Amino acid sequence: MQKAHGTGVVSFLQAGARGAAAYALCPAALALSACAPAAGSPPAAAPPSSAQAEGAAPPSAAQAAPALLDIATARVVDLTHPITPEMPLYPGNKPYASETLSTVEKDAYYSSRFSMDEHAGTHVDASAHFKAGAPTVEQIAPEQLVGSAAVVDVTAKVAASPDHQVTVDDLRGWEARHGALGARHIVLIRTGWGARWSDPAKYLNQDAQGVMHFPGVSVEASRYLRERGVRCVGIDTLSTDPGPSQSFDQHKAFLGAGGYHIENLANLEQLPEAGAVVVVAPLPLTRGSGAPARVLALVPASGVAGKSARGRAPAAPGARAPAGGERAHGTRPLATRGSRVARGGRR
Ligand SMILES: [Zn+2]
């Protein structure tokens, strides 16, 4: 591998279910790849059992070819909703509040104090949220917070039924197109619900009895993901459990089995089904059951996804990100090496 002039070329190799390996820094190539497990990295998740043993799983993308992400031309998509006092909340949570402590005019510097619930806004649920003694949010290993995005699109099913629960078949459909899910995937459920965020009543979608109706993930699909070694599932709704749930069976199944969630994701419609890299950054609150998180996705400028990404050459040095209309809300291309990652466009 070579280092393209003026850019850093990141070789992003999805570690598959069977060959899970940490992203190791290969100094000569300035590349992140699965060339070897990183020293000190924790052991990979337990290998999948039944599905793998049957030999029915499609080959993982990692085993086919690495996808290349050129950080000079990649788009950065902000998957985070801005935190406001008006944002939708799970019933019982208190609104975000901020108090000004000092101002530039009076004190030479501006600072504030804020308060909010751990599970408000775009946030992470740690295993401890539903299992006593399980890891809390600051204990989630950094290696688990960076992964290859597997965007499972169920918008058509949700349009037909807001109570849709993601099925094992929904996940298998993604695998048929893009390869087996594995330990280094971050699975993002795209339901289309994020478009309701600015209207809390529509986002909670309560019926006359106060029962909420929004899509979630089934218990069976949650178990399937953990069998595959997947550590994180995220969704663009208020909860990974479907709205009507009062027993939180999905939370118990996935968090209880060592996974973590991201809830209230934004801008999932801007991601390809495969090919993006996701970085999840929850506040490392000590003994936190969860925490607000900034979640960013790096999308190859070529927009490659899934099968088409396999074996494709990296974008040429100096290649430009899609221009104009493709650069939607919350998206910015990365500029050249040394420049800062642009911020999401809504603030
Ligand atoms: Zn939560």
Image (cartoon, helix red, strand yellow):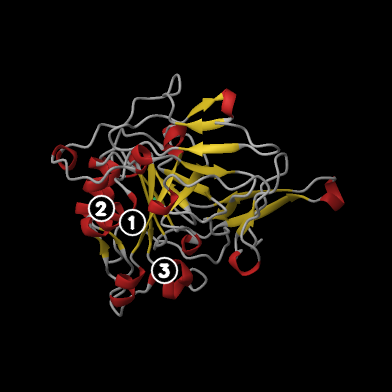
Mark nearer the N terminus (1 vs 2): 1
Residue at screen point 65% across, 61% down: 345
**Which residue is tagged 3?**
192
**Nearer the camera: disc 3 or disc 1:** 3
Mark nearer the N terminus (3 vs 2): 3
**Nearer the camera: disc 3 or disc 2:** 3
Using the image, determine if residue 151 lies above or below residue 53: below
Q: Are marks 1 and 2 in contact (CB under 8 Å)?
A: yes
Q: Is residue 187 left or right of residue 123?
A: left
Residue 238 at least partly seen: yes
- Which element is circle 2 on? helix
Kind of residue sitting beneath label 2: Gln
- Which element is circle 1 on? loop
**Which residue is tagged 1?**
240
Residue at screen point 58% across, 48% down: 315
Most distant residue in the top direction: 39
Kind of residue sitting beneath label 1: Thr
Using the image, determine if residue 317 lies above or below residue 238: above
Q: Is residue 307 left or right of residue 77?
A: left
Residue at mark 1 to residue at mark 2: CA–CA distance: 7 Å
Residue at mark 3 to residue at mark 2: CA–CA distance: 20 Å
The spot of residue 282 in percent (x, y) is: 50, 43
Q: Are marks 3 and 2 in contact (CB under 8 Å)?
A: no
On-image quarter of the C terminus: bottom right
Residue at screen point 58% across, 44% down: 70
Mark nearer the N terminus (3 vs 1): 3
Answer yes or no: disc 3 within 8 Å of ligand 1.
no
Residue 284 at least partly seen: no
